[in-house]
Image (cartoon, rainbow, N blue to C red):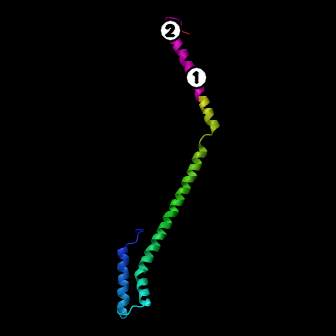
Amino acid sequence: MSPFVDADAARRACYVGVQTVMSSTNPDEVTLQTLHEDVTAGFAGLRGEITSEFAGLRSELADIKSGIADLQVTLVVGVQSLPGRESAEETIRLLRESTRLQAETLRLVAALVNRRGNGGPAA
């Protein structure tokens, strides 16, 4: 069901209600009572539709709130599992140390290859 009211359907329902009430009494006699009965009959179905639409919207809103709560928990857990600043600094220090050791190893290998290429003795 659409959350928007079909104005034509409401008018038709009101007109049917007016015809029903007015045909049971003198059609020339219009009083506050007959107007009240007409409006009540015409909008009785509309009230039920609106009530059911609001119930559906409340249910959807509850689902959205639940989804947001789940997202908040996921974000908090995810942020807490990230390494702290000290851990990140330690990781960077270790990576730099590893890079320095690899560079030194490559320098030694290059020197060894150079000696072998020049006819020098292998170490």
Q: Is residue 92 magenta?
A: no
x and y percentages locating residue 52 in the rendered image: 46, 72
Left or right: 21 with respect to 64? left
Q: Tell which of 80 and 57 is nearer to you.
A: 57
Give the secondary structure at mark 2: helix
Q: Is residue 99 magenta?
A: yes
x and y percentages locating residue 59 in the rendered image: 50, 66
Residue 116, numbered circle: 2
Which residue position holds label 1?
100
Q: Amino acid at mark 2?
A: Arg
Position of residue 114 relative to residue 16, above or below, is: above
Give the residue at x 56% y 56%. 69
Quadrant in the rendering for residue 93 = top right
Position of residue 61 relative to residue 33, above or below, is: above
Give the residue at x 52% y 8%. 115
Q: Amino acid at mark 1?
A: Arg
Which range is magenta?
95-121
Left or right: 84 with respect to 67? right
